Each structure stands twice: as structure tokens, then as C-alpha cells.
Amino acid sequence: MAIKMTNYVLTWTDTDGVKRASAVSYDKASAQDRAKRLDAEDCDDIVVSEAKPGELPVPG
């Protein structure tokens, strides 16, 4: 049985208003944990999305 690895990336706006994007991809649990930590740091517009292997988000 094949295991499907799904990669997740994050984008957010930091407390200074600068749009940011993750420089690494995460598994689902790690991405959700990172999103919670960003929220605790008062970051806004936190988005967790699926990505293809090797694909990283661009701050928008």
C-alpha cells in the first residue's frame, strides 16, 4: 500500500504588516501547530494550504 505524503505551506501577515510565507513545507499536524503559534504571536491572515513537493508559497 502506497502512502501519500501531502505537503502544507503557510502564508501570513506579521505584526508589522509585512506579508510572509513559509520557507519549508510541513505535514498537516506541524502546519496546524505553526499556524497556532503564529496566531499566538498576533499575526493575521494565516492561511494553511496544500502544496506540491518542492513548491513554496510567495508572500502575497
Image (spheres, helix red, strand yellow):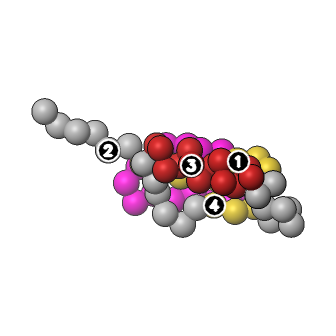
Q: Which mark is residue 21?
A: 4
Q: Earlier in the sequence, mark 4 or mark 2?
A: 2
- The mark lying in front, picked from 1 and 3, is 3
Callout 1 touching callout 2 (CB < 8 Å): no
- The amino acid on which the numbered mark 1 sits, given as a three-letter code, is Ile
Q: Indicate which disc, 1 or 3, sits on the residue closer to the N terminus.
A: 3
Callout 4: 10 Å neighbours few (<14), some, many (20+)?
some
Q: Which residue is labeled 3 in the image?
A: 33
User: Which element is circle 2 on?
Assistant: loop
Q: Residue at x 49, y 50 (%)?
A: 30
| Stretch in magenta | 47-60
| Residue type indicated by callout 2 | Met
Front in this rendered view, residue 37 or 31: 37
| Residue in the image at 86% along x and 66% along y | 16
Q: Is residue 59 magenta?
A: yes
Gap between marks 3 and 4, in whole Å? 15 Å
Q: Is residue 1 left or right of residue 48?
A: left
Q: Earlier in the sequence, mark 1 or mark 2?
A: 2
| Side of 50 where 20 appears, left or right | right
Residue 21 image point, x, y percent? 63, 61
Q: Residue at x 49, y 63 (%)?
A: 24
Please name the amino acid that badge 3 sits on: Asp
Q: CA distance from mark 2 to mark 3?
A: 18 Å
Q: Residue at x 42, y 48 (%)?
A: 27
Residue 1 quadrant: top left
Question: Of callouts 3 and 4, which one flags the residue occurring earlier in the amino acid sequence?
Answer: 4
| Quadrant holding the C terminus | bottom right
Image quadrant in which you'd find residue 47: top right
* Pointer 4 with pointer 1, Cβ within 8 A: no
